[in-house]
Amino acid sequence: MTDKKRKKKNLLITLVITILCAALLFYAVQYLHHSSSTSAASSAESTAASTTPAASTASAAESSSPAETAESTPAEDTAAASSSDGCSTAILDAQFTDTSSLLLIANKKYKLPEGYVPEDLVDAGIPCTNGSATMRAEAAEQLQKMYADALKDGVSLAISSAYRSEQYQASLYNGYVASYGQAEADSISSRPGYSDHQTGLAADFVEGGSSDFTDAFENTSSGQWLMTHAYLYGFIMRYPNGKQAVTGYDYEPWHYRYIGVENAQALYSTSPDETFEEYYQIDGGDYCQS
């Protein structure tokens, strides 16, 4: 073989080898690029898969947060709550349990402290058909103002009782039970320890006639005057008509309770028939059955 042919052959071999190397390099680059893209895609999918639940959880937390807040935040007016046996499940604010408070509650759901006696009892200071009666000092002061202003309108107010001790209430209640049975007694009188009278802030008004302690008292001059003026002096009708299921007692147009002038006026402005339980959203009704 001549040198010329040999050189030509070597050149051809070199060219073929160069082309093959270039092809191999191209395919190698393509393979590496494809692998890198696949790995990145896989990593992205993995990351997305791992972060999606967290995002969903955050989203769920954001959407559930208002509901949780609504459930855990007490309502502005605390709704009364009772269990299936009629027992109260509500925790009362101190203003309803503090024995020095004018809003001290006494009803069939809430009993006064054992043997409770108000510390500031004074003479009620107006005519009493049972001789005399006592009340807490502020209530007595306003009662006397109310009596004086009623006289100016030609109405002479009188009471039959105000503060009653737990012992006296026990004898009174037991007498009703003996005469009428417990169910009837519970509708017209309080068990000892549950009486509004024991707070020293309640009074029963009378006129000394057949209307006393009956629904007809609302039509007497005293009954009419009290219904339209008592709240101005801090007194509310404790057991209004049609509210037996709320208060636990029959209608008593003669029974008034002192809660303070501002409180009484605020309650009355809501509705003249608003009960203590409704206005302050406190459990009422019948006794706990446990």
Image (tube, rainbow, N blue to C red):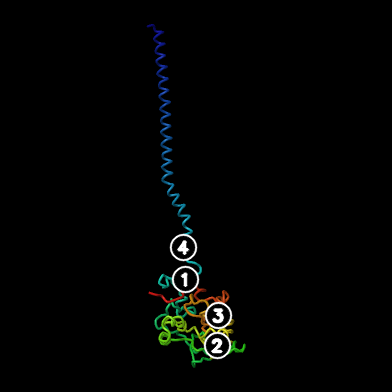
Q: Is residue 243 left or right of residue 174?
A: right
Mark 3 nearby-residue class (10 Å; few <14, some 14–19, many ≥20): some
Task: Say above or below: 96 vs 9.
Answer: below
Which percent across, then down, holds residue 161? 49, 88
Q: Earlier in the sequence, mark 4 or mark 2?
A: 4
The nearer-to-camera label among 4 and 2 is 4
From mark 3 to mark 2, how far is it between C-alphas? Answer: 14 Å
Residue type for callout 4: Glu
Q: Label 1 belongs to which residue?
A: 80
Q: Label 4 belongs to which residue?
A: 71
In terms of depth relative to the viewer, which is nearer, 163 or 172? 172
Which percent across, then down, holds residue 7? 40, 11
Quadrant of the image containing the N terminus:
top left
Residue type for callout 2: Gln
Which label was assigned to residue 144?
Answer: 2
Helix, strand or loop status at disc 4: helix
Q: Earlier in the sequence, mark 1 or mark 3?
A: 1
Mark 4 nearby-residue class (10 Å; few <14, some 14–19, many ≥20): few
